[in-house]
Image: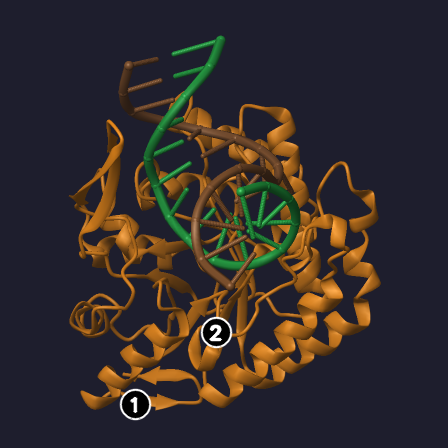
Chain colours: A orange, B brown, C green
Amino acid sequence: MSRHRLGFAVKVLGDGGLPSHDTRRWQSGPHLRHSLEMFGAILDRLERDDVRMYRLPTQLAPYATFPDHPEFHDQVSECAEELAAVGARARDLGVRLSSHPGQYTVLNSENPDTQRAAAAELEVQGALFDAMGLGPEAVVILHVGGGAGGKEAARERFAEGFGLLSETARRRLVIENDDRSFGVVDVLPLAQEIGRPIVFDVLHHHCYDPEGLTVGDALGVAMGTWPAGVRPKIHYSSPRTALGEKERKVGRRIERSPVVPQLRAHADTVDPIGFEELLRGPLGRQDVDIMLEAKGKDLALKTLRDHLVGRGFGWEHGELVV
DNA sequence: CGATGTCAAGGAATC
DNA sequence: GATTCCTTGACATCG
């Protein structure tokens, strides 16, 4: 018997939706305190819906690393009590938290300013989780970054960037295979060098797999990087297949033409057939948490769960029981 | 009120 | 060397 938490990222869409963080511009004085109130409401919803895994927005502490706005830089310590409270609540509920800085956080950038900015961002993410008192399963997920100079040089720059981090930020960081430059096997030597695990993204693997590994083999590589006692996690999504539209100006009229989506684009929901294949095949008997990356967010999770439960899988305390 | 512009930030491909 | 794509929403401003 194996168990898998299922999670979703950032936005809550169900029942009219919930705000995920204070998105006001800096002129309006946004603050982590407000984001944490919103997060409290999201935890209520997670409890109600029996969901035990959630990705926090990277912008939870707004403007916390803007070089020109030092007035935002102390939000984590200003909210120490609120963070401890909300973290205790997440722990009591068994909600596994993570965050995933986006394309602008490039720890292996050739530009030292960009690299330092990425390091600063990772420090904040790590400090947030530490202040929440979360265990080692709460990780900050990052891609390797740019590929300039070749894979080895790119990995080397990443390792340098990793060296800029505090011990606490290092302990949170995990690396994810991406969809065009660094497959699982490309990430592996870096993961080993810095002693941090790999989050395996199944769709990315299908997009970029230079060695031609099966999902099972690639998954096995990633699983081997997780220490005993910390449940591994993976990302799962289905590719968008619906045709999009592109508009183009021809003279003064606008012409619309259909666009076939790229494989990497996320669908609204998760294909339950492909997901079941993963559960019954490559995932085997391992306990692995699964972050769903679907545009439909919590709605996609609940739909998938309904499908799976309808097909005989169990659901207990936020975990799929296989 | 609805439409449009803007937002911190990178990298890679393309011209 | 400059522009566009990637991809995303929501705030802010304009008409």
Q: Residue at x 48, y 72 (%)?
A: A12
Pointers 2 and 1 in contact (CB under 8 A)? no
Residue A142, image x and y in percent? 49, 47
Q: Decide: few, some or many residues near mark 1? Use Cα within 10 Å; few <14, some 14-19, many ≥20.
A: some
Q: Is residue A260 visible?
A: yes
Q: Quadrant of residue A32?
A: bottom right
> Tag 2: Cα neighbours inside 10 Å, few (<14), some, or many (≥20)?
many
The answer for how far apart the CA atoms under marks 2 and 1 are is 17 Å
The residue lying toward the viewer, choosing from A320 and B1, is B1
The residue lying toward the viewer, choosing from A89 and A296, is A296
Circle nearer the N terminus (2, 1):
2
Secondary element type, mark 2: strand
Q: Residue at x 64, y 73 (%)?
A: A38
In the rendered image, residue A156, in percent from the top left (x then y), is placed at: 50, 29
User: Image quadrant of residue A137?
Assistant: bottom right
Q: Is residue A275 above or below residue A115?
A: below
Amino acid type shown at disc 1: Gly
Residue bearing the label numbered 1: A314
What's the residue type where badge 2 is placed? Met
Q: On residue A53, which mark appears?
A: 2
